[in-house]
Image: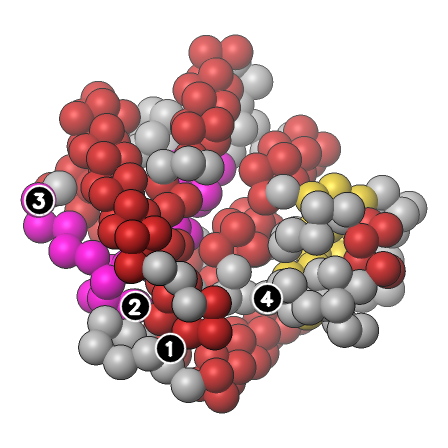
Amino acid sequence: MGGSMKLYGVPFSQPVRAVMWLLLNKQSPFEMVLINPGSSGDNGSRHPDYLAKNPGATIPCIEEPDGFSLGEAHAIMCYLCNKNGWTDMYPDDPKQRGLIDWYLNYHHRNVRDASGLVAPRIRKDLNIPQAAQDAARANLTRALEALETGWLAKRKFLAGDTVTIADMAAYVEIGQLQPEFTNLYDFSAFPLVQAWLDNMHQVPGHDDVHIVLANLGDISQEAPEMDTIRNANKQALGRIKERLAEFE
């Protein structure tokens, strides 16, 4: 895959999963390069070589064979759709695209806080204050209320009757909290959100991208060991490589 686009990150990362899902859904070849977020080591997001590609030191980041690099999951997904003509996922129609962009801009300080429920259990070393955890849960609940009474009250998916990159971006955050994964949130108060979650399960690539969470399992009562997290990432990477081999 020497001529393929590279995707830097780890399967456990929510934004990385969104980009992987789009690529697998479209059966578009790429090379997965593992990058340890926050590390300055050889394969870390703060190593000088990686910072030359993505000065923000975040994952994901892509690198094209010609050396062009791009960070931030939403920017990457929009770019890939524009480049490859994936207008089903990011339509040309200005109003439809506007609805998608609306959600993608809303996402960061709202739905993204779903990961604020996961991080304290995965990264005990960060000593995330309880107040910050409570704030993340409150922000997420308000966001789910907005989805329930707004976006999903009018449409099957966030921007219409079909899946777009807005749904993938939202699901990797919200969906990770379901009982079959980390089991960190009760969605019973949000029936439309629950129906949307169920519909997203049927989107091609869902199971491949979320095997990391299926292997990690319920963490609501006990935080997983780091070896468990590492093994889940390795198993997920193995599944991704199997799927990529099918595209060759």
Task: Inspect this view and state whether residue 78 appears.
Answer: yes
Specify which label sits upstream in the sequence, 3 or 2: 2
Lateral position of residue 136 relative to residue 53, left or right:
left
Q: Mark 4 or mark 2, which is nearer the start of the sequence? A: 4
Residue pointed to by mark 4: 10
The residue indicated by pointer 1 is 216
Q: In this view, does 69 lie to the left or right of 196?
A: right
Residue 39, relative to residue 238: is it above or below?
A: above
Q: Nearer the viewer, residue 54 or 191?
A: 54
The kind of residue tagged 2 is Phe
Residue 235 vs residue 9, the one in the foreground: 9
The percent coordinates of residue 139 (x first, y second) are: 29, 40
Secondary structure found at label 1: helix
Q: Earlier in the sequence, mark 4 or mark 1?
A: 4
Amino acid type indicated by mark 3: Ala
Q: How far apart are marks 2 and 1 (CA)?
A: 7 Å
Where does the image place residue 197, in percent across and percent down from the top left? Answer: 26, 48
Q: What stretch is highlighted in magenta?
A: 163-189
Q: How crowded is mark 2: few (under 14 residues within 10 Å), some or many (20 or more)?
A: many
Local secondary structure at mark 3: loop
Q: Which residue is drawn at 74% across and 42% down?
A: 70
